[in-house]
Image (cartoon, rainbow, N blue to C red):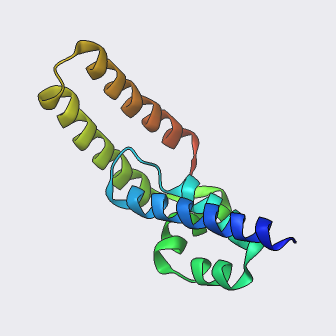
Amino acid sequence: MPPVWRAFLILVGTIALTVGLIGIFVPGLPTTPFLLIASGCYVRSSERLYRWLTSRTWYAESVGAFMEKKALPLRTKVITLALVWTSLGYLALFVVQSLATKALILTLAVVKTLLLSFIRTAR
């Protein structure tokens, strides 16, 4: 692999990892897709970074079950939905004034709920 392409993949993987880690704390910002992007970039560019990423417990909790079983733990689903509806519900009901913006925020919460419902639950 050319060094420029390798450096590009490491950069994209690191940016995706950073956004994914922020997504752990910011409701509405997805974590799993960014961690999957980071792992995909790292596996193609740096075996050391890929091993480091996959050895983290927070990675295994977020992505491990999903990658192995194509399912999420019930606890992850419940926490995600609680955070989404609490934060976005508060935002839509008490912070935003525009009716269109309120509708958009609540639509995002509904979409996230539907997406989570289509993912199998790990047992």
Residue at the far front in the pictured view: 4
Left or right, 100 with reference to 119:
left
What is the number of callouts on the image? 0
Left or right, 11 with reference to 45:
left
Report the front residue among 107 and 76: 107
Can residue 123 be seen at all in this image of the molecule? no
Residue at the far top in the pictured view: 99
User: Residue 51: x, y in percent?
Assistant: 66, 83
Q: Quadrant of residue 103?
A: top left
Q: Quadrant of residue 94?
A: top left
User: Residue 109: x, y in percent?
Assistant: 37, 33
| 12 over 104 or under it: above or below | below
Can residue 116 be seen at all in this image of the molecule? yes
Left or right, 13 with reference to 77:
right
Residue displayed at 41% across by 47% down: 29
User: Residue 113: x, y in percent?
Assistant: 43, 37
Residue at the far right in the pictured view: 1
Report the front residue among 111 and 23: 23
Report the front residue among 32 and 18: 18
| 47 over 39 or under it: above or below | below
Q: Which image quadrant: the C terminus?
A: bottom right
Residue displayed at 32% across by 26% down: 106
Residue displayed at 37% across by 51% down: 80
| 62 over 90 or under it: above or below | below
Q: Which image quadrant: the N terminus?
A: bottom right
User: Residue 54: x, y in percent?
Assistant: 61, 78
